[in-house]
Image: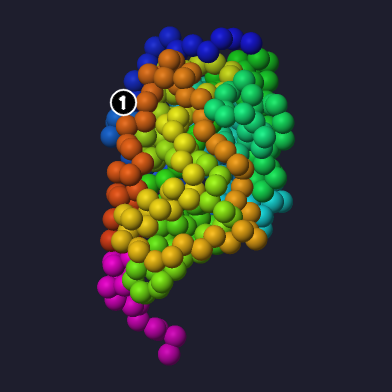
């Protein structure tokens, strides 16, 4: 396979037609904003208009928008609880959307670049840390999110095959766990940082004396601020042109126990933390080897965890205040 390398020339985004699938989502909305500030002409399709689990819809999307670059971010995703509740749906929707977007890109035949965003859930559950791109196939993903991880991993194989056979310039990025303002705080589907922020903020507001967290707090994770992630994705579009995956992260690791202690301090929660060991804690360790992104993309995360958490907490509190103070809509049913 080709060795990882920078693209021959950086992309000029001015007036460039770009599609961001999942562009209305958490990461997608930040990426769309960054691209628009670079003067790109961005389309962020909605599912009601283009259901990408349908091949005809994916083909129609590219025909309607005539993009030069496509960023594929659309995903069915959630935390451990959501993965346990939806293994079939998460596999099918992620596999179907990826298959259709890549095949539609081949049929369209005019892309400068297809950027596919993967997940650390694709790495083997027992992989050594730090997680290196070359180790991606050294085992099966962690069982609590394996269907999602396998579906995302399979898209790398498809992208590599399409590059080899059809010359499709597809690159595949593996992102650390994301967080930041605008994250999903729904307790049924949220990831660990918004879930813990919500627990602590709610406890402070309600005067509760304790919060409960899953597992024993010992698993570790790496967290990437959403603005850093969007910047790295754009850099990859501009500078990376290799079939091999590339990690984007901070290279820093923190245990869930330490994370919750930090969030409790930042939110002002002073009560007791209870660990529910009957519930799963997920993969034991996750930390990416980010040396390739540093070398090839000159990418380094800029937002430290504590600072990113402060901003996320403040924006969440502001949103809650707005929701509480907003007038209720009139009931017109009577």
* Residue 120 coordinates in the image, percent (x, y): 57, 36
* Residue 119, visible in the rendered structure: no
Direction from residue 71 to residue 325 in the image, left or right: left
Q: Would you name the residue on which mark 1 appears?
A: 14
Is 134 rendered above or below residue 227? above
Q: Residue at x 56, y 45 (%)?
A: 219
Other-residue count near label 1 (Cα within 10 Å), few / some / many at <14 / 14–19 / ≥20:
few
Circle 1 sits in a helix, a strand or a loop, which is it?
loop
- The foreground one among 32 and 42 is 32
Whether residue 290 is in magenta: the answer is no
Q: Which region is colored magenta? A: 319-334
- The foreground one among 233 and 64 is 233
Q: Residue at x 63, y 33 (%)?
A: 123
* Residue 303 coordinates in the image, percent (x, y): 32, 36
Q: How many callouts does the rendering have?
A: 1
The answer to which image quadrant residue 159 occupies is top right
Dividing the image into 4 quarters, which one contains the C terminus? bottom left
Q: Residue at x 36, y 41 (%)?
A: 305
* Residue 246, visible in the rendered structure: yes
Dividing the image into 4 quarters, which one contains the N terminus? top right
* Residue 71 coordinates in the image, percent (x, y): 48, 33
The answer to which image quadrant residue 329 occupies is bottom left
Direction from residue 244 to residue 330 in the image, left or right: left
Q: Residue at x 34, y 68 (%)?
A: 204
* Residue 241 coordinates in the image, percent (x, y): 50, 16
Spot the residue most to the bottom: 334
Is 217 rendered above or below residue 152? below
């Amino acid at each position: 396979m080709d060795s990882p390398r920078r693209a021959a020339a950086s992309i000029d985004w001015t007036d460039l037609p770009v599609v961001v699938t999942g562009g209305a989502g958490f990461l997608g909305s930040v990426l769309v904003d960054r691209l628009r500030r670079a003067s790109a002409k961005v389309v962020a399709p909605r599912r009601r208009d283009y259901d990408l689990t349908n091949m005809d819809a994916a083909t129609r999307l590219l025909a309607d928008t005539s993009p030069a670059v496509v960023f594929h971010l659309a995903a069915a995703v959630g935390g451990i609880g959501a993965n346990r509740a939806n293994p079939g749906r998460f596999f099918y929707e992620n596999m179907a959307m990826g298959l259709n977007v890549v095949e539609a890109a081949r049929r369209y035949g005019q892309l400068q670049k297809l950027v596919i965003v993967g997940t650390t859930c694709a790495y083997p559950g027992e992989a050594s840390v730090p997680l290196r791109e070359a180790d991606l196939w050294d085992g099966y993903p962690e069982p609590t999110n394996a269907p999602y991880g396998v579906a995302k991993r399979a898209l790398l194989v498809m992208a590599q095959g399409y590059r080899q056979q059809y010359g499709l310039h597809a690159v595949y990025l593996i992102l650390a766990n994301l967080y930041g303002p605008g994250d999903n705080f729904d307790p049924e589907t949220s990831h660990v940082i918004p879930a813990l922020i919500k627990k602590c903020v709610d406890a402070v507001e309600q005067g509760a004396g304790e919060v409960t967290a899953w597992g024993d707090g010992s698993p570790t994770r790496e967290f990437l601020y959403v603005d850093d992630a969007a910047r790295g994705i754009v850099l990859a579009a501009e500078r990376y042109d290799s079939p091999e995956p590339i990690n984007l992260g901070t290279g820093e690791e923190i245990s869930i126990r330490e994370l919750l202690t930090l969030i409790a301090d930042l939110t002002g929660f002073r009560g007791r933390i209870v660990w529910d060991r009957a519930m799963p804690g997920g993969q034991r360790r996750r930390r990416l080897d980010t040396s390739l992104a540093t070398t090839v993309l000159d990418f380094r995360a800029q937002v430290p965890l504590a600072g990113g958490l402060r901003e996320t907490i403040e924006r969440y509190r502001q949103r809650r205040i707005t929701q509480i103070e907003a007038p209720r809509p009139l009931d017109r049913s009577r």
